[in-house]
């Protein structure tokens, strides 16, 4: 069941769900708007030109209020908001249609698991022929919450728990 604005507000007020910072106008009828943070990371070039999944990948990370995303460029970014989900709530990230119509693809691979705590790393791709200027604080998507039928038996305690900033892949830890 997808949560309504009423239920989201109730969960926030009773501190079952935590989103910080949060302005009341971010709460939409069936979601919460997420804003772009100020941390951006790009994969550093590999001498071989090949990324392997069994070795740590290095990233160049910058903190800036604006970032120019070039045509065909991929960058990791972060949400301005820090989230704490209870064990009976899951969420997923949806991009804004207005930005998708500009060729800005916003993705978050997978669900936000119950028990997750941290900023959400976003994968951004510019499919346009023009550069797109990204600005910290701009609404870039929405988080849609869904109630689970029971609390998770094994809530999230994975390798991205507590992340802050645009966090690179830790797939090399999946051995």
Image (cartoon, rainbow, N blue to C red):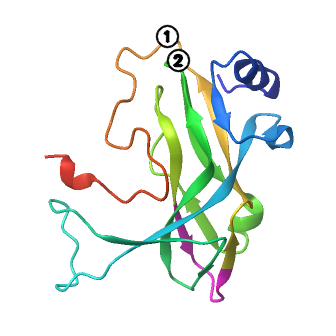
Q: Quadrant of residue 152?
A: top left
What residue is shown at x 49% (from left), y 10% (from top)?
Answer: 150
Task: Determine which residue is flagged by label 1.
Answer: 150
Tell me the magenta residue range.
123-132
The answer to whether marks 1 and 2 mark residues whose Cβ atoms lie closer than 8 Å is: yes
Q: How far apart are the two marked residues, 1 and 2, measured between alpha carbons?
A: 6 Å
The answer to whether residue 106 shows anywhere in this view is: yes
Residue 79 percent location from the top left of the image: 60, 53
Q: What percent of the width, then of the height, locates residue 105?
A: 59, 66
Can residue 112 be seen by looking at this rendering? Answer: no
Residue at the (49%, 34%) spot, across then down: 117
Is residue 127 within the magenta segment?
A: yes
Which residue sits furthest front? Answer: 63
Q: Which residue is mark 2?
A: 88
Residue 70 position (above or below residue 97):
below
Residue sitting at the far bottom: 129
Q: Nearer the viewer, residue 14 or 26?
A: 14
Left or right: 128 in relation to 31: left
Q: Image point 49% across, 19% down: which residue? A: 87
**Quadrant of residue 45 within the rendered picture:** bottom left
Residue nearest the observer in this picture, 93 or 86 = 86
As helix, strand or loop, the secondary structure at mark 1 comes to: loop
The quadrant of the rendering that contains the N terminus is top right
């Amino acid at each position: 069941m997808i949560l309504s604005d009423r239920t989201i507000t109730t969960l926030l007020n009773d501190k079952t769900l935590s989103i910080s910072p949060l302005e009341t106008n971010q709460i939409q009828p069936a979601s919460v708007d997420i804003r772009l943070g100020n941390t951006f990371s790009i994969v550093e070039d590999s001498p071989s030109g090949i990324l392997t999944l069994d070795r740590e990948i290095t990233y160049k990370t910058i903190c800036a209020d604006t970032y120019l995303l070039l045509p065909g460029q991929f960058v990791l970014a972060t949400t301005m908001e820090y989230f704490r989900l209870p064990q009976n709530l899951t969420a997923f990230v949806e991009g804004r249609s207005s930005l998708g119509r500009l060729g800005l693809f916003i993705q978050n691979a997978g669900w936000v698991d119950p028990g997750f705590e941290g900023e959400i790393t976003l994968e951004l791709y510019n499919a346009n022929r023009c550069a797109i200027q990204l600005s910290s604080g701009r609404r870039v998507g929405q988080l849609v919450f869904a109630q689970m039928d029971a609390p998770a038996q094994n809530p999230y305690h994975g390798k991205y728990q507590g992340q802050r900033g645009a966090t690179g892949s830790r797939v090399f830890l999946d051995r």
